[in-house]
Image (tube, rainbow, N blue to C red):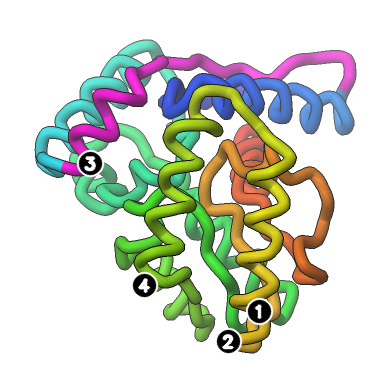
Amino acid sequence: MKRVGLVGGLGPESTIDYYRRIVEKWHRSDASSAPALMIDSLDVKHALRLVEDDRQALVHYLLESVDRLASAGVDFIALTANTPHIVFDELSREAPVPLLSIVAACAHEAERRGLHRVVLLGTRFTMEAPFYHDVFARCGLDVIVPSPEDRAWVHDRYVNQLLLGQFRDETRNELVALVARLKKEHDADGVILGGTELPLLFSAPTIADLPVLDTTELHVAAIVERLRS
């Protein structure tokens, strides 16, 4: 059986969600066994400081985790967060085992559904970086991000609520209103939950009548498929 390594802790709530979803998805196909996985948990606050101030140090920090997992015998690795994918290409070049991209999994599903213009929600780093735009552009898809003021607001709620395990109705309602406004302004036809804490805030398949791309669920599906291949 193949074994997956998860770079976790970015943050803890979503890492727990990954583990639960991987096990549940595996059991839906085979309740007689369990998936083989290992988790190396990092410090989300330290990682966010590196995203802000020192991207090369971020690559080194993540690579240390990747190396620990590879040394433990995993066959491939997944980062259980969107923001660290900001250095995914650099990390992939140095990693001793393959990395499975959350962004590619999301883009493939958007293309499969026939979407064209999708709203991206996540940390400020994820919304402002080019990695979602670049991967989606290869599939002929456009990514829409909120205004600088709205990005700052979303980032504040993400870091100071969601990463702390606080999932408030008020924040959910305000994000729905933001998506509805962006849908109207940009003729969007989908929304990316581009932070793995966001599916813990939103469980419905739509937001403001737009179909949701749950990056955690799509990544988990890709992980389980790779484990079974």
Tell me the residue that label 2 is attached to.
Answer: 186
Tell me the residue that label 1 is attached to.
Answer: 183
Q: Is residue 148 visible?
A: yes
- Element on which disc 4 rests: helix
Q: Earlier in the sequence, mark 4 or mark 1?
A: 4
Kind of residue at disc 3:
Val
Comparing marks 3 and 1, which lies closer to the viewer?
1
Q: Earlier in the sequence, mark 3 or mark 4?
A: 3
Q: Earlier in the sequence, mark 2 or mark 3?
A: 3
Tell me the residue that label 4 is attached to.
Answer: 134
Q: Earlier in the sequence, mark 2 or mark 4?
A: 4
Give the image quarter of residue 208.
bottom right
Q: Residues within 10 Å of mark 1 (few under 14, many from 20)?
A: many
Cα distance in 3D space between marks 4 and 1: 21 Å
Does residue 126 lie above or below 165 as drawn?
below
Residue toward you, 174 or 9 = 174
Please give the name of the residue rendered at 56% of the width and 40% of the height, measured from the top-left corner: 196
Cα distance in 3D space between marks 2 and 1: 6 Å
User: Position of 108 compared to 212: left or right?
Assistant: left
